[in-house]
């Protein structure tokens, strides 16, 4: 879906985590023949945005190599210096790296390989049409990717811990746009099948 406004937009791929539950970098693990993180990169590159940024941290060089090898459009790499403190630090690094004229951003998580590509366009459209934030919702649960208007960038730059933008959504109450979605890929992440890790993880 093409962008319908002249406002600048960007996509962030958060790929900096320590993967403590796996004991190794899950984002570089083999997922159906490819590094896991490359699926989020695919979705970000397919999004109707002007810029794509990938935030690295743990094993940054290896992550960067995987990302660039599979990217279908230019991707800017940014390293989160304090990535070990949690997902919020990766999100903060990505927001800080945005061009000053970016009016909306859509955020992809590197461990969510099944997000359908059309969802990014839907949540971005909601934000560009006036919502402060938007996310897909399936069976009452908020999924990913989420989009944010530039008015929320200052709040995103103050986040801490490992809960991402959860507090931002909580603070918005009913103001954020819930975009209905019937694809379970907006909820699935690899941590949800952690008990099956030995089945798919290849060091």
Image: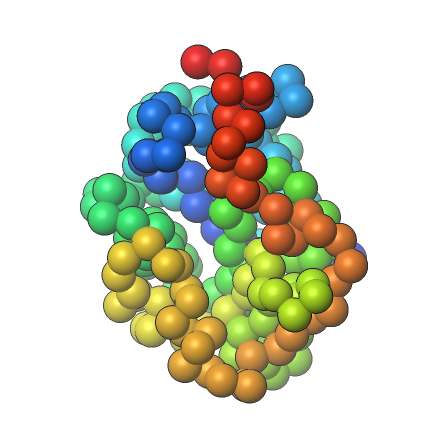
Q: Give how far across and how far down residue 132 sits, in percent.
A: 52, 79
Numbered label tally: 0
User: Going by the image, does 64 lie left or right of 8?
Assistant: left
User: Going by the image, does 135 lie left or right of 58?
Assistant: right
Vertical position of residue 163 compared to residue 62: above or below? below
Residue sitting at the far top: 203
Q: Give how far across and how far down residue 97 sits, in percent.
A: 35, 54
Q: Quadrant of the C terminus?
A: top left
Q: Quadrant of the N terminus?
A: bottom right
User: Going by the image, does 103 lie left or right of 15?
Assistant: right
Q: Give how far across and how far down residue 141 sits, in percent.
A: 61, 65
Vertical position of residue 63 compared to residue 161: above or below? above
User: Going by the image, does 56 lie left or right of 192?
Assistant: left
Q: Residue at (65%, 64%) from the top-left corner?
A: 136
In-front residue for pair 22/65? 22
In-front residue for pair 176/48? 176
In-front residue for pair 24/196? 196
Q: Give how far across and how far down residue 51 sits, in percent.
A: 53, 51
Q: Residue at (69%, 70%) from the top-left corner?
A: 179
Q: Residue 48: in sight, yes or no? A: no
Vertical position of residue 198 compared to residue 46: above or below? above
Q: Residue 20: in sight, yes or no? A: yes
The image quadrant that residue 125 belongs to is: bottom right
Q: Residue at (50%, 47%) from the top-left corner?
A: 109
Vertical position of residue 11 compared to residue 171: above or below? above
The image quadrant that residue 162 belongs to is: bottom left
In-front residue for pair 146/23? 23
Q: Residue at (44%, 77%) from the top-left corner?
A: 170
């Amino acid at each position: 879906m093409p962008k319908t406004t002249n406002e600048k937009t960007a996509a962030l791929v958060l790929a900096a985590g320590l993967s403590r539950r796996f004991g190794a970098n899950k984002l570089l693990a083999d997922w159906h023949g490819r590094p896991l993180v490359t699926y989020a990169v695919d979705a970000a590159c397919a999004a109707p945005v002007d810029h794509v940024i990938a935030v690295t941290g743990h094993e940054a060089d290896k992550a960067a190599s995987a990302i660039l090898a599979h990217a279908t459009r230019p991707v800017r790499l940014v390293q989160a210096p304090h990535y070990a403190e949690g997902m919020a630090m990766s999100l903060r690094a990505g927001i800080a790296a945005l061009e000053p004229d970016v009016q909306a951003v859509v955020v992809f998580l590197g461990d969510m390989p099944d997000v359908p590509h059309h969802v990014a366009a839907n949540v971005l459209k909601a934000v560009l049409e006036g919502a402060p934030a938007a996310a897909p919702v399936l069976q009452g649960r908020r999924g990913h990717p989420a989009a944010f208007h530039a008015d929320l960038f200052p709040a995103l730059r103050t986040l801490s811990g490992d809960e991402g933008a959860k507090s931002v959504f909580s603070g918005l109450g009913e103001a954020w746009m819930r975009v209905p979605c019937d694809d379970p890929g907006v909820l699935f992440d690899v941590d949800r099948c952690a008990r099956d890790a030995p089945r798919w993880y290849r060091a």
